Image (cartoon, rainbow, N blue to C red):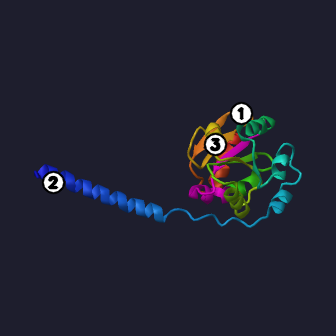
């Protein structure tokens, strides 16, 4: 082996070693499922009592997993025309989704009287897994069950999870790929992209 090839091979080994170390550190830093404030759905509904329609309709379905696919969600979005809307695509098996759920629980309570929140459970193979997740990590809004992933891809323009779509009052859309690291960052984006503040 020539010295040049030996140097390239050594560089490749070093690069591969650094990559493996980085992946191990990344795996070790995967966020644990959130320690969600243990509010019941009834407590959440109480906090949002007095919300205007159609937001009150969302709060009445808090924690539910709705069927109907794309036509049902598009119909729901049509009833929300003129309202700021946040649509979060998640799955019960998705660790980044689980990590950001506490932020969505908190933000939907803080902003829920003026912003509509909706979930899309995309890619879960069973409704029971999704419902168990929603019981463990309740939120003040419903989600649409999307076993095939087609609904989530149509709304978020992505096959990945999590993805969050913001609609402002005029219907302009902003898509955020990836998890939210904190409630503060999520609320900042709600104000910026949904409320236009």
Percent position (x, y) of residue 13? 26, 57
Does residue 152 appear to the left or right of 63 in the view shown?
A: left
Number of the label disc, if any, that sits on residue 152: 3
The residue at the far right in this view is 50
Q: Which mark is residue 44?
A: none
Residue 27 is situated, as x and y percent measured from the top left of the image, at 46, 62
Q: Which residue is mark 1?
A: 171
Which numbered disc flags the more N-terminal residue, 2 or 1?
2
Q: Is residue 19 above or below residue 83?
A: below
* Badge 1: residue crowd in 10 Å (few <14, some 14–19, many ≥20): some
Q: Quadrant of the C terminus?
A: top right
Q: Which residue is mark 2?
A: 6
Q: Nearer the viewer, residue 90 or 140?
A: 90
Q: Is residue 30 left or right of residue 92?
A: left
Residue 8 left/right relative to 21: left
Element at label 2? helix
Q: Closer to the N terminus: mark 2 or mark 3?
A: 2
Residue appearing at x 57%, y 58% in the figure: 95
Residue range of the region highlighted in magenta in the rendering: 82-103
Pointers 3 and 1 in contact (CB under 8 A)? no
């Amino acid at each position: 082996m020539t010295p040049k090839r030996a140097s390239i091979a050594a560089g490749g080994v070093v690069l591969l070693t650094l990559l493996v170390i980085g992946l191990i550190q990344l795996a070790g830093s995967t966020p644990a499922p959130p320690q969600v404030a243990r509010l019941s759905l009834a407590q959440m509904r109480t906090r949002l009592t007095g919300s205007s329609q159609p937001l009150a309709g969302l709060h009445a379905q808090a924690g539910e997993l709705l069927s109907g696919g794309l036509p049902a969600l598009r119909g729901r979005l049509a009833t929300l025309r003129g309202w700021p809307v946040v649509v979060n695509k998640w799955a019960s098996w998705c660790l980044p989704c689980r990590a950001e759920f506490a932020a969505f629980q908190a933000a939907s309570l803080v902003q829920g009287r003026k912003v509509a929140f909706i979930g899309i459970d995309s890619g879960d193979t069973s409704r029971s897994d999704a419902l168990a997740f929603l019981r463990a990590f309740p939120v003040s809004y419903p989600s649409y069950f999307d076993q095939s992933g087609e609904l989530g891809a149509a709304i978020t323009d992505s096959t990945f999870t999590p993805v969050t779509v913001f609609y402002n009052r005029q219907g302009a859309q902003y898509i955020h790929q990836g998890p939210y690291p904190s409630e503060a960052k999520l609320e900042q984006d709600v104000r910026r992209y949904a409320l236009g503040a």
